[in-house]
Amino acid sequence: MRIKRPTNTFITVFSLVLMLVVFYLPSTVIAGGEIVYLKYNVHAYQKGSGYNASYANWTNPGPGHVLFPVNTAVRVSSFSRWKAGRGFFLTAVDEGKKIAYEFHKQRMGMSIDEYVELITSPKQVSLKGLSKKDREGIRLGQARVGMTKKGVMMALGYPACHRTPSLEDGVYVYWQSRFKTLAVEFNSKGKVIRIRQ
């Protein structure tokens, strides 16, 4: 008895279909799609019907600047496979607003999953123990003299690692936009002493 082998045409068609399925699947869910809460403010700007944000934080990107505050309930999902590795989506549960969040693995020195785990929490974070200055800065999404490192991070976001390699550093560097930075300087006690644009 002779066994029929697949023809080259069949193999080629099957391979093409498989490639299309793998690379053009709709967004898949990171972390199971459960609701998580932002540990830090997310600064974004409106683009069309959605929003854009970045690991670089864009703390003052100009017109259309929107602040998604600490403890906003979000669902996290990945970009479609052909953009995989470039970022992820955050969707604010209450408002349904979708944020395309760009990410740079080499600059951050971690995977997207590690970063998402870093900026979100399974339950709301407490602001207890933070000073009045910290809470005000967090509410406004701004760094202010006298704030703590924790307060600044909650207000502006987790600093990009290629410019702030360690949270022990005396200066945290943020981007106001794609081209302009903001340096927040701390004293030896971890309080803001100067903000340079």
Image: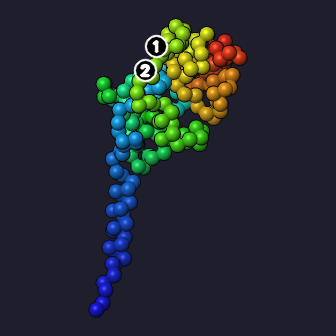
| Residue to which mark 1 is pinned | 139
Where does the image place residue 154, in percent across and percent down from the top left? Answer: 51, 21
Q: Residue furthest right?
A: 188
Where does the image place residue 97, in percent across and percent down from the top left? Answer: 34, 28
Amino acid type at mark 1: Arg
User: Foreground residue, 148 or 93?
Assistant: 148
For this view, does 100 lie left or right of residue 148?
A: left
For this view, does 73 lie left or right of residue 59?
A: left
The correct choice, above or below, for 139 with respect to 94 in the image is: above
Q: What is the distance, in whole Å, between disc 2 and disc 1 at their CAs?
A: 7 Å
Where does the image place residue 54, in percent across and percent down from the top left? Answer: 50, 32
Residue 99 visible at all: no
Considering the image in quadrants, where does the N terminus appear? Answer: bottom left
Amino acid type at mark 2: Pro
Residue 149 visible at all: yes
Numbered label attached to residue 69: 2
